Image (tube, grey):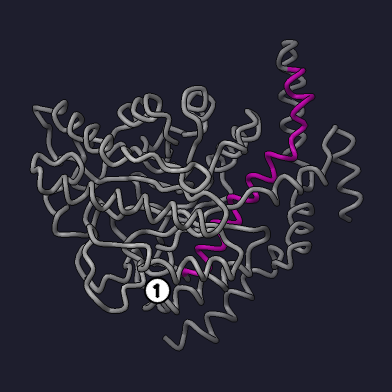
Amino acid sequence: MFNEVKEMYAAIGVDVEQALTALAAVPISLHCWQGDDVGGFEGSDGALGGGLAVTGDYPGKARSIDELRQDLEQVLGLLPGNHRLNLHANYGDFGGKPVDRDAIEVAHFQSWIDWCARNNLGMDFNPTCFGHSKADDGFTLSSPDSGIRDFWIEHCQRSRAIGAEMGKQLGSPTVTNVWIPDGMKDLPVDRQSYRQRLSDSLDTVFAEKLDPAHNIDAVECKLFGIGSESFVSGSHEFYFGYAQKNQTALCLDAGHFHPTESIADKISSVLMYVPELLLHVSRGVRWDSDHVVLFDDATQQIMQELVRCDALSRTHIGLDFFDASINRIAAWAIGTRAAQKSLLLALLEPRKTLREAEISGDYTTRLALLEQAKALPWSAVWDEFCRRNDAPTELELLGRVKDYENDVLAER
């Protein structure tokens, strides 16, 4: 069957083996916070804050670092390809001792680095600027209170140093992404001062130049959040300008824009002006609700754009959703595999022929080829990719998830 499918794709100018090689070279950064509903290991049961909310209470949530790692290892076994771990700063190995955010050190994350090394994973990292008493008023790096700003500046500086050490030890640069929840529920009268303070704070955070072979800085925008419906300090325009001026990576989160707005159209424009792109692939439903990623039009369009503008080498792909209404292992696996399937479908397009038709003005051929590609049996190529990587095929996935639920999660 697979060989026949290869011949079908060859007939339209697509090398399937080349597509599989390209797919295998693109890791997805697995977000640790899906496994425990953004809880972390600081020992705090406080509210997340910052407009973040996790809905659902499905049994089997990871309650410790060991359980979270066990679940991650299970997920990795369900995924074809080689991937990365995306860790938030509140997931440090603190040994049950209180460590405030402005005091975190590499030592608190060494066991994570060692675990990633054993599992052949790269790492990405994030300062955690929410779920803390010094973020309760809705402001961190743009706060009018200099003491609050200094606290979060220190936290972000330490996070960058930790990220750089992760990248150094693992031999793969860590993307350290700064997102803050700063904003207002109602209309502000002085937007400028908040954004000026944010810019100044970021300048201080990024003042120390780190080796890009170890650490890549990224900044992340957002349209609004719960409690910041009318104003967000770090808007898309702010961070696009900041990233362009300072040549950092820019993070585009699929859930951080208007529900009718696709980030796919932004990719080619953004990459004209910033060196690298970080994607947080998510699914907002009416608001930034971080639903599990699907093999849907939005995800497919994002991956199509990355492939069509040859941006994979300059793009870091991560996931950002947290669904506690279903089996968390299934959520991780289904969402990651949806992103990979979308990328595969993009890689199976007859790009050379499509570009030639478009440049020549033959839009009829362009449309016909795009529709023809959708009808080809791409799923046979996906199943072959899974088999080559000792991962379950689509029809095998649910059984593996249910077995783990019965054997492990049900006992928690």
- Measuring 22% from the left and 72% from the top, which residue is drawn there? 98
The residue pinned by badge 1 equals 58
Instruction: Indicate whether 400 appears above or below 83.
Output: below
Q: Which residues are magenta?
A: 328-357
* Tag 1: amino acid: Tyr
- Quarter of the image with the C terminus in it: bottom left
Magenta stretch, main secondary structure class: helix
Q: Please say whether residue 36 is one of the residues in the magenta stretch.
A: no
The N terminus lies in quadrant: bottom right
Q: Report the front residue among 136 and 52.
A: 136
Q: Residues within 10 Å of mark 1 (few under 14, many from 20)?
A: few
Residues 18 and 99: in front is 99
Name the spot of residue 54 as percent of width and height, x first: 32, 61
Query: Which residue is drawn at the image coordinates 42% and 43% (left, top)?
Result: 210
Q: Residue furthest top?
A: 360
Give the quarter of the image for residue 82: bottom right
- Secondary element under disc 1, as helix, strand or loop, is loop
How many marks the image carries: the answer is 1
At a point 70% along the width and 48% down the height, the residue shown is 23
Q: Position of residue 285 (x, y in %)?
A: 39, 47
Side (left or right) of 178 relative to 307: left
Position of residue 296 in the picture relative to residue 207 (left or right): right
Q: Position of residue 18 (x, y in %)?
A: 80, 43
Please say if 15 is above or below 386.
above
Left or right of 98 in this view: 216: right
Q: Residue at left 61%, top 64%? A: 120
Tell me: 302 left or right of 193: right
- Image coordinates for residue 202, horizontal then vertical, percent: 27, 37
121 shown above or below 303: below
